[in-house]
Image (cartoon, grey):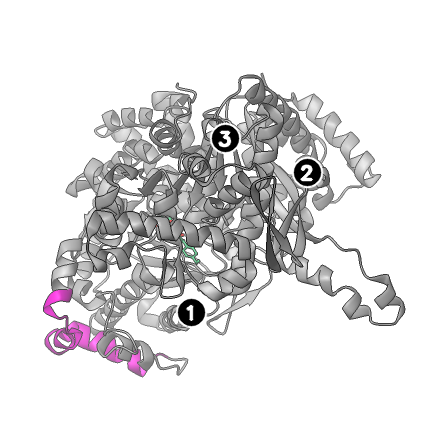
Amino acid sequence: MTAFTTNQLEEALTSKLMVNFGKTAEEASDAEMLRACALVLRDAMALRGVETRKETKRGEKRMVHYLSLEFLMGRSLQKNAYNLGILPQLKEALGHLGFQAGDLFELEPDAGLGNGGLGRLAACYLDSMSTLEIPAAGYSICYDLGIFKQKIVEGQQVELPDNWKGIGSAWLLPKPEEAQQVHFGGTLREFWDNGHLHIVQEGATTVLAVPCDMEIAGYDTRHTNVLRLWDAKSLKPVDMSLYSKGEYFKATEDEAMAEVIAKVLYPDDNHVEGKSLRLKQQYFFVSATIQSIAEKHLAAYGTLTNFHEKNVIQINDTHPALVIPELMRILIDDAGMSWDQAWDITTHSVAYTNHTVLAEALEKWPQDLFQRILPRIWQITAEIARRWQEKCENFFHDPEKVRDTAVVWDGVVRMANLCIAGGMSVNGVSALHSRILKTDVFKNASEMEPEKFTNVTNGIDHRRWLAEINPRLDGLICDLTGGAYLMQPQALRKLDAFAGDRDVLLRLARIKQENKKDFAAYVKKQQGAVLDPESIFDVQVKRLHEYKRQLLNVLHIIALYQRLQDDPNAIVRPHTFLFGAKAAPGYAVAKRIIHLINSLADQIDHDPVCKGKLKVVFLENYRVSLAEHLMPASEVSQQISTAGKEASGTGNMKFMMNGALTVGTLDGANVEMHDVLGDENMFLFGLHTDEVAALRREGYVPQRLYNRDPVIHRVLDALKTGFRDGVSYDDLYGRLLFGDRCPADEYLLLADFAAYCDAEKRMAAAYEDPVKWNEMSLHNIARSGVFAADRAVAEYAERIWHVPYRRS
Ligand code: 26W
């Protein structure tokens, strides 16, 4: 069933090079060959995509539409070759043609159309939906610029534009004939005709949405779905009358206005800005998407009355929440349905996933902005809000609860409440997170509509995050248990049986060692830093946010450093702390923490006492492709958020699957990791959610800890003094002890500090017993199957989407 033999691939690549670049393989550059590879694979996938859609139509199957403002796809060549089952053939063909496959793969830019967890989750789910043969499509914006490239200059983050489309666009197939029009602004005119009230939006600005499709091939199947990325174009041609008058800029003004919508991904993670361009982006992609779905549905069934039977729309957080009023608009204004019928269809089509409980991340739009940009959508939203509020009033008879659950209140539109009102399902992304939604964040709404609330714990694409990136470990697993785990991740459990097998543990240790060497070579090449593969690789990689507590990790390293000052023999095992994190460009505190990590790294590098004992490295520009090099080489995974704040985490799962041991709090999916691993296979520490709440109620005073605990005292003082670069971190010191327009030590770093140091100590001690360590590592891999995206997507399919899927 393979798509290509080596020979066929060689031929296809050679002719692609000739047709596209007028070159032979000998003449072609790496970049040209990379493009040729992408085009050859894209052709093969496009063919399968056509077959898949035909089959979906023929079988009148229900289709899943996954809407997300972010898809953090990373690279595609190796992944697609892997899923098509032609990775070895591709490598061989490239070799014959005089190219090094590894170099070519490394040349591909990441498609970084996302910030962090939410975007990467969407990418992993696309893979599983195709692999499980679910008719599905993803929808987003075809940003010109993805997440910024991070450079570290003199210890500080500098953002550079991420122009990924040069080579990256080879995967995209533009479909201009399927373009949609999206209208902004203008005024509404109402008139009666034929006993019907009609509403038209006059004087609106129209933007053309042009789809660019990226094929998503499943593993071990011909099933191929599509990720539809909307590009924004101006409808109006350049105004030549202005142009001929010499007003060149004015002539292209409309064009520039339209195209700015798809210009750049907002680099904010867990923090809303409330910018009008962001609202325009949301409506742009939502409207284009729903129009395109409705158009195809009408073409297939001739009516929208059965829309909900044939379509389900999953919205990735509230960012696409406008699907609810937009679908209502299409059903009422375009299809002429009554409000009640339209509402019935909408509330049986849309499902909402919440990904964060942070108050500053919950989307709220000022009513006047909303109304100005989306006048008709505002009308519909206001009517949804009015009816929902009436229902809440009749249910609660409590003004406080009515206020809390309202969709529009005090001139503000609350998107999460809109999703609860208009959705058929609301889910959190880990057991703990879903419980917090029910008992805290959405307590009142869940009392009214308990049946809507559910949990689907996140999962990751284990074929990418294990098999593809860690071929040595994949080899060991296949030797011991066969390749069944690729389609049945729970089969990894069989590895548990080898925990007592010294040979297996030794092989596992060697694999990690080899991976560490590879990673050290990679880092040397990328940024010149020298890692000692004999040291512990202790890693914290994720977006930089105070709740994720990178600063707690830093405080512990400072304490270690100070111990080393007192006693140069305090550390026996060399320890390398690796950080990788992008800070939102406007998040000043996060940027200060990055600077601090680099100041500390520099101090340690220049202190002879630390030589061969302690090292800190900040990995520049953390992204999917860097994570792919890093995960197989990691030994310790830092998952240390304040309990109750991390919705799930998915990095934690990637580390576990690659055999790293977790130092973590009982937060997000760490709780479920602990359920399968027990205390003995991870290093838990810190306050639990209820203890966090209790401490806050009592009144948390971090200064007391500072005054009482000499270690904390000395560590914090070092922040104030700073390091050899002369930069003082007294702002961070002040934030921890006194707060700064926020509570002192809002995320309870000092409260958890002692417990954290102890956990690191237990971890370091465990490392000294390699047999024990590797046993634990093996258990982590063995029990990670439950965190496969295939399991998560199967749960969505069964409990929320009600669509069949391939079982193996
Ligand atoms: C509007 C600004 C904004 C942008 C992104 C607000 C909120 C977000 C996301 C919801 C933040 C995010 O990525 N959340 C993460 O989602 C992951 C996938 O479910 C979880 O594993 C992480 O715990 C959660 O932080």
Residue 694 shows which numbered tag? none
Residue 275's x, y, as percent?
50, 65
Callout 2 amino acid: Glu
Q: Which of the two labelled residues, at mark 3 and mark 1, occupies the earlier sequence position? A: 3
Please tell me in which quadrant of the rendered image residue 539 appears: bottom left
Give the secondary structure at mark 3: helix
Q: Which of the two labelled residues, at mark 1 and mark 2, occupies the earlier sequence position? A: 2
Q: Residues within 10 Å of mark 2 (few under 14, many from 20)?
A: few
Identify residue for label 3.
307
Callout 3 amino acid: Phe
Residue 178 shows which numbered tag? 2
Going by the image, does 724 lie left or right of 74?
A: left
Vertically, is 187 above or below 61? below
Indicate the quadrant containing the N terminus: top left, top right, bottom left or bottom right: top right
For the residues marked 1 and 2, what is the alpha-carbon distance in whole angstroms? 39 Å
Going by the image, does 18 lie left or right of 119?
A: right
The one nearer the camera, 617 or 137, is: 137
The one nearer the camera, 136 or 115, is: 136
Identify residue for label 1.
587
